[in-house]
Amino acid sequence: GIHFFNPVPVMPLIEFVRTILTSDETMAIAREFGASLGKTMVTAKDTPGFIVNRLLIPYLLDAVRIYENGLASKEDIDTAIKLGLNHPMGPLTLLDFVGLDTCLFIADAMYEEFKDPRYAAPPLLRRMVLAGHLGRKSGKGFYDYG
């Protein structure tokens, strides 16, 4: 399978997911396809989260935990990551962009698969999703977009 990142026209990466049935010929075709789109391709085994989400989801959930526990304001969390790690946006802004419901769905699937507490969704994230605060798509998440 091929995993694109949103927004597809802007994001330069594609994760190609290689299964035990994927031939070298299919890999070569996929790489040509990715190159024809001007994308960089990385290969991951067929496992939940692939590469990016295996790393991204615990990071996003930790940002929610820091905010939930009152260790820092949402603005300071985002600013710290943007300026301290040179990320284009902070984790709470990214959550709003991706969708809190989408992140929760991925976290729950990964927790179910691995039973790793790093993937256990914080209560605040669940409450926000239940309240319909899904981020940009609903007009409200960690920030207001109305």
Image (cartoon, helix red, strand yellow):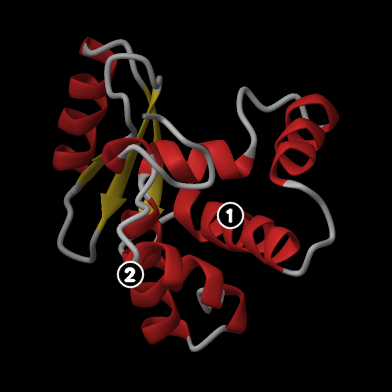
* Relative height, residue 120 to residue 96 (above, below): below
User: Helix or strand or loop: what does disc 2 sit on?
Assistant: helix
**Looking at the image, which residue is at 27% across and 54% down?**
18
The location of residue 98, given as percent across then percent down, is: 38, 42
Depth check, mark 2 against mark 1: the one in front is 2
- Residue 82 visible in rendering: yes
Amino acid type shown at disc 2:
Leu
Distance Cα–Cα, label 2 vs label 1 = 18 Å
Which disc is residue 60 wearing?
1
Residue furthest front as drawn: 146
**Where's residue 74, x and y in %?**
69, 45
Residue located at (38% from left, 83% from top)? 113
Residue 47 in sight: no
Front residue of 64/88: it is 64
Residue 130 tag number: 2
Tell me the quadrant of the picture where the C terminus can be found: top left
Q: Give the residue type at disc 1.
A: Leu
